[in-house]
Image (tube, coloured by chain):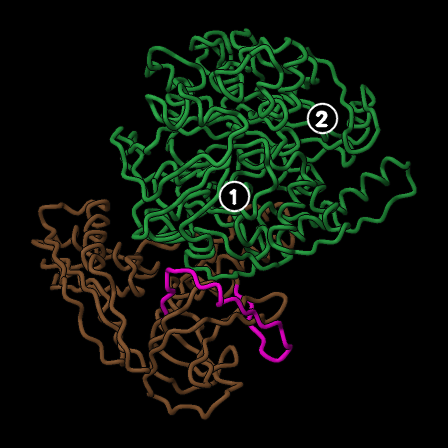
Chain colours: A green, B brown
Amino acid sequence: MMQLGFESKRGAMVFAAVTLMCVCVAGMVLSADTYDAADAWWKPGDQRLMPASAEYQDALGRVRVVNANGPVATKGHAFFTALGSNGRACVTCHQPSNGMGLSAETIRRRWDQTGGTDPLFAAVDGSNCPNLQQADRKSHSLLLDRGLFRVFLPWPPRAADGSALQPEFTIEVVRDPTGCNTDPAYGLNSKTPSISVYRRPRPVANLKYLLELPHGVPPSEFLFYNDKSLLPRNPETGGFASLQLMSDGRDLTPKIQARDAAKNHLQTIAALSDKQLAQIESFETQVYAAQAFDNVAGDLTGAGSPPGLGPEALEKGAPARLGNNPINRIFGSFAMWQSLQPPAAGADQTRALMFRDSAARGADIFYLRRFLINDVGKYNDKGLGNPFKRSCGSGCHNTLLMGMDLAPGYMDLGLNNLPWANARPDLPLFKVVCNSSAAPQSYLGRVIYTHDPARGLITGKCADVGASMTQQSRSLAARAPYFMNGSAANLRELVDFYDRRFNIGYSEAEKVDLVNFLGVL
Amino acid sequence: MKRGHLSAALFFTAAAVLAADPPAGTPVSFLACPVARDTGPDTDLCFFAEYEGNRYALVNPPDWGVPQLKHRVLVEGRVKEGPGLCGAIPIEGRASVIAEIDENCNLILPFDDVIKGAAGGVFNSGTPQQRAFAQDLARRVALDPNLSVEPAIADPAPAPLPTPPFEQRTLVIIYPFDSDRGSGPDMVKLKDLVTFIKVANARSVRVVGFRATSRLSSGSDITEGQQIAENRATKIASILGGLGVNAKLVHVNWQARAIDGNGDGDWRNRKVEITVEP
């Protein structure tokens, strides 16, 4: 349970107890409990004490998860207990060892450990479609290969009160390798017409940054940036809601999301009780996660480290602030890692310093390197201009310490819609045709081919087809693959997508620097 | 996301001109493809549009007027005195992005090292108090980089509450052609008006939406859609209600007939008028 040890995915180095020695030599105190990958899976019903601070091995080092309110006893806790008929709990898809998200590597390991019998692979959404042979690995290919769960949404869309909305577009299935959208029981022509799309679970950590309304971008504390219409109300507080919680913005609060997830992912029969919802919300809003140790750079927190790294910075930080300025630089200064002369000491130390220098260059590229952002629906057309010249950080990833877009809104980056989306023969492809009276998607018009209509499935609006909320950029090393449809298997593919999408022209060295930077977040 | 408020007017600069410059005060109204110009590695793009051999600069419009390639732009304004911007004639007025796609609008001029933009930033935007806060934090961060995760942009001080005597107030919100999207600065004014409505315990709020025809310099007319006046008025009423204004106070109306245009300032007719009676 308390072993130390990890393997580097970046190099071939293997660290074990030596790591602890190095940390002590460097004068650091390793205060967090540390778990290796082998015993890091949290099963529903496990009776554990989740520490106030714990580290978990991930692909590039260790992610640290902090419970700001102290240790959490999981016995009987609604987040950690199977609440529905399929044996899953919230923790099934929000694993501490994955920064409260879930990596495809963890999913595959779980498949291998259980022969596919873990509740994680429940037919309802852990397979490509419930009508498939569940014992067959191929039936779970999207989950195993891309970390994607089936999300089935009603068609036509429904308002928050359950009433049907009149969509501005029709939708047809062009092809569907999963078979679910054409299935008589689960598809568009079933008794309960629905559309199946396939998405990554978002990490349940650092939520205060997602739930607070934005500062410094008036009037976006009460209006959508895009069209200057009112934000929806948080039914629990009566205040406006930020919409940052989910990729399509459909569930506005942790409690609403928990209700939705319990019904659709946990297959609960009865609604969760107020006590269970309060317990889930209380836990989720105090847990923070970020990378804390890198296999090459070493410890990422403490004296001499960039102040924005580690979960403690997130716990202390001010939420929902603009970071796209020369002081904040989104994730704070990395100057302490820049251009340090390698000492005459050992090769590992030299390598660590070179890596840190590279990550610091990556921070500069992220914040400073401008490129033309063009044809992003619900972004370039919200008053920024097309094209709009910004960097990653000064453009869409401007929230201090978190790296998502601060203004409440969503955008079609090109993840879901053709022609920009990565080739995805494994996903359904839909054809959307918008009414002639509807405002068109600004750069695709009224006929759109998409793997996931995303926000358009919630609002029914043509201009929203394929648009999604940007998401936080923390604990990335613990929760690959990336993007809402898992298009990027690793950080390099993530950088390559942007480089292609916006014709940036990053050099090989710049790509390496960016990957190293993103990996320490 | 672009932060800060954009000016409510268009201000442009003339430089490279293809025909004789029209004199200041000359009204212009035309549809054209915007052209983007790169103004340097660390600065924003700027835009201009050509009409009858002249380039008219489209710089600092309200947020909804920032041009978009793949869309034509309706330019309405008057030629303005003053130095050029973006290599084009300055005008004062409005630009509207036309919603329908036009693939012909797709030209970006590369940086020519002559027409250079100015970088914006936290030290020259926001209120004086916000700028002073950022400058002070910058000094402290130079000494202690750990402070670089402290928010550099302070929340602005809340506007002072209105005080008696309370008199009738009217807010006019101008819209882009065929759209119900208000600008960010206008929506901030609307929020301030809501504060006034509440503090003054207003007796009534009258919301009237309008639609308009724009007469182009070529002599032809373009008219907004039938529904847009209603859409504008009901959207404003919805926002007022969402911000806590009692619906019983709000009287919503719209003028179905489009206001005629004369080619000089027709953009002023695309509006909602909100009148508050204390």
Q: Position of residue B208 (x, y in %)?
A: 15, 60
Q: Label 1 is found on which chain of the structure? A: A
How far apart marks 1 and 2 lie (CA) works out to 32 Å
Is residue B221 something that shows in the picture?
Answer: yes
Please name the residue shown 35% across and 15% down the image.
A272
Q: Position of residue B96 (x, y in %)?
A: 36, 67
Q: Which residue lies furthest to the left in this view?
A: B203
Residue A103 lies, with reference to residue A489, above or below; the image says above
The answer to whether residue A9 is left or right of residue A333 is right
The majority secondary structure of the magenta stretch comes to loop
Local crowd size for mark 1, using a 10 Å CA cut-off: few (<14), some (14–19), many (≥20): many
Could you say which disc has been placed on residue A404 in the image? 1
Displayed quadrant of residue B267: bottom left
Q: Are marks 1 and 2 on the same chain?
A: yes
Please name the residue shown 34% across and 40% down the image.
A460
Q: What residue type is labelled 1?
A: Met
Does A134 appear in magenta?
no
Q: Label 2 is found on which chain of the structure? A: A
Please give the range of residues in magenta. Answer: B95-120
Residue A218 lies, with reference to residue A274, above or below; the image says below
Q: In which quarter of the image is the C terminus of chain A?
A: top right
Please name the residue shown 16% across and 54% down the image.
B197
Residue B218 lies, with reference to residue A395, above or below; the image says below
* Residue wearing tag 2: A29
The answer to whether residue A413 is left or right of residue B264 is right
Please name the residue shown 58% across and 8% down the image.
A117
Q: What residue type is labelled 2?
A: Val
Out of A117 and A365, give the one closest to the viewer: A117
Q: Position of residue B275 (x, y in %)?
A: 14, 61
